Structure formats: C-alpha cells, structure tokens
Amino acid sequence: MSNKLSFSPLWIAATATTLSLLPSALGSSESTNTNNWVGQISTPAQTVSVGDVPDISWQVQYPLTLDDMINFEGKSLQSKRNIRAEVRVIGSGWGTKTKFYHVKGSLYTGTGWEEIFFGNNYDVDPSAVVYQKNVAEGTVIDAAGQGGMNWGADCTSWSDWYRTWDVTPNVVVLRDGDSAPQLDPAYEIQASVKDYLSPYISSETGLITLGPHDVIYLWDFNNYGSSGWDLQDLCVLVTFSELPQ
C-alpha cells in the first residue's frame, strides 16, 4: 500500500529522509497497537524545519486477516492465495459411559482425502501439529469425521462420515467472535465441548477468541437431537499462514 499525505510538523521527527511517526500521529497508544502495519515512511526532504509541512510517502503492509486468505462458502473453505494449513486435535470424547472409542478425521485440499487423526481421547495432544499441507490458491478445503461404533483401533463398524459440504448440524465451523456451544457431555467420563474450547473462549464476552488465521471444527457422530449429541466427539483446530508469493 503506498500513498502521499502531509503532516503537521508537531507530529513528525526527521532523520535524513526517513521519518518515524509519533503516537499522536495515529491517535492514542491503543490505536497505535491495533494498527499493526510494517514498512517505511519517508520524505524527499533532507531536513524538516519547524513550520514546514513536508510531503510524506509510505510503503506499508498490514497483516493478513483470515478473510484475506480464506473465502467461506458455508462450511467449506476456499483459499484466496497460496497458504499452509497446520492441524491440531484439541479434543475427542466419543465413546460410552466407560470407554473412549476411536475416531477418524480427514481433510480434503484438492488432491483427495488425507487422514489427519486416528485415535481416541488418550491419543490427543492439543499442542502437537498432526498434519500440515501447502494449499494452492483457489483450492476448496473440506473436512470430515466419523466415529467407531465399538471399542478398539480395529473396530469394524463406523458411524457415517460427516463432511463440511453436508447439510448437517453434526459438523460446526467456528471462527473468532462466534458464540461458543454450551452443551453438557453425554457421559461423566467425557469432557464437555466447552472444556475443550476453554482456552479459546473469552472470559469477558463468552465468545470464541481465536488467532487471526484460525478456525475450529467440531463433530458429533450421534443423531442430532439425541441425548448423546454434544459436539465434542472430535474437535480440530486449523491454523493458516501465507506462503511466500
């Protein structure tokens, strides 16, 4: 972003041809923090005397937002530029009163479905990146999950796949500022969806508070409206970052 403008001399400090803005040029210190741009501001003048109003040129960039990188098409996403996706699993509570069953999670990034998680509650490490992929501009991104219907990694019966392109309440996509689901877990051994999301919920507003490039997927593998429907069977955090252009 480039442009030209004139500043009051009380707002600028000049050294050779490079100027640095004082806080009063951008308003309060709080607004200075929120305008988190990077770049250079300069003037062709070698010195600026009191009373002069110089021309100022700038070459600055603002950090990309999620909307700069991703187009939301319902629960499907489409990349607006070349990006990288990093996936973390933040919770899995699928099972019964006494056991946790295995779940599967997959991501589609234009080259077929790829598994991002296979395991149960005990296999979850919210800090670990379980999958990462470079995604080309214009790629449609979808996610899917399903739950095992009996105990063990070798179970032979599975729930339906629930995909983001399905018209179903069994997959929810959250972004910064969304309302946090308030549902109790089906069984006492399970954590609630609010427990899984607690690091991402504002204590002041109760709303989802994510990083500027994050989305969260929630799955439930029970029938909607049943006593077991609690949106914590699989919880996944995806972080996007821009690749060098």
Image (cartoon, rainbow, N blue to C red):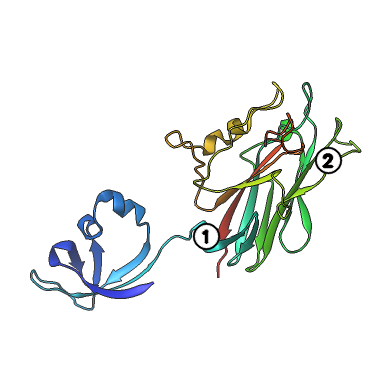
- Mark 2 residue crowding within 10 angstroms, few (<14) / some (14–19) / many (20+): few
Regarding residue 129, the answer to whether it shows in the image is: no
Q: Quadrant of residue 99?
A: top right
Asked whether, in this view, residue 34 is left or right of residue 244, the answer is left
Instruction: Identify which amino acid the numbered label 1 is placed on.
Output: Asp
Q: Which residue is mark 1?
A: 67
**Amino acid type assigned to the residue bearing label 2 in the image:** Ser
| Rendering coords of residue 112 (x, y %) | 78, 60
Mark 2 or mark 1: which comes first in sequence? 1
Q: Is residue 130 visible?
A: yes
Q: Give the quarter of the figure containing the C terminus.
A: bottom right
Pinpoint residue 14: horizontal percent, then vertical percent: 19, 67
Residue at mark 2: 159
Instruction: Looking at the picture, tell me which residue is in the foreground, 98 or 181.
Output: 181
* Total numbered circles: 2
**x and y percentages locating residue 119 in the rendered image:** 77, 37
Q: Secondary structure at mark 2?
A: loop
Which corner quadrant holds the N terminus? bottom left
